[in-house]
Amino acid sequence: MPADVVVRPMRAEDRAPALDLWVAAWQDAYPAIDFAGRRDWMDERFEELTGRGAHALVAARESEIVGFVIIDPSSGYLDQLAVAIAYQRRGIAGKLLAEARRLSPRQIELEVNEDNDRAIAFYRKHGFRISGAGVTRLSGAPTHKMTWRPF
């Protein structure tokens, strides 16, 4: 990971670049889905999650937002983890996940699309196990529920 990348709480001015990053990263992963059309939904999701006490953190390199994570420490639910395409596979997602673990040290749960082999491999590498099944709210795609516990 680039040494000059820091993880810090998301600021108001970080939200638009984080949304742009989210659209680009998901569009790259699922080209057939219009993620630009879902940008407003994600913007509302930021508001909903942080309004309920979730923490939104960014990975920043100088003034550039290169990743973000949203974790709710009260439930241990990790709702979003995204890294800019140019910065993927450079340790940034692992650093964001480490910060999520610091905020939710007893357990983290998340959902990942069943066909997202790269994300599933990432989470398994970081100690997550498949713990159930679900379906995404927007597309109805099947998901794996994954859980991490420190023991």
Image: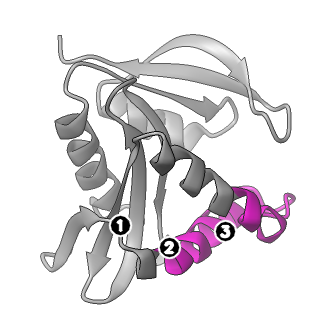
Magenta stretch secondary structure, dominant: helix
Residue 61 shows up from this direction: yes
Which disc, if any, is residue 23? 3
Residue 80 shows up from this direction: no
Picture quadrant where residue 137 is located: top right
Residue under the image location 55 percent in, 72 percent down = 21
Q: Nearer the viewer, mark 3 or mark 1?
A: 1
Q: Nearer the viewer, mark 3 or mark 2?
A: 2
Q: Which residues are magenta?
A: 15-41
Between the C-alphas of marks 2 and 1, the distance is: 7 Å
Give the image's coloring scheme.
one colour
Residues tagged 3 and 2 counted as in contact (Cβ below 8 A): no
What amino acid is at disc 3? Val
Q: How many numbered callouts?
A: 3
Percent across and percent down for residue 71 are 39, 41
Which quarter of the rendering shows the C terminus? Answer: top left
What amino acid is at disc 2? Arg
Residue 107 inside the magenta-drawn segment: no
What amino acid is at disc 1? Met
Between the C-alphas of marks 3 and 1, the distance is: 17 Å
| Residue linked to disc 1 | 10
Badge 1 marks a residue whose secondary structure is loop
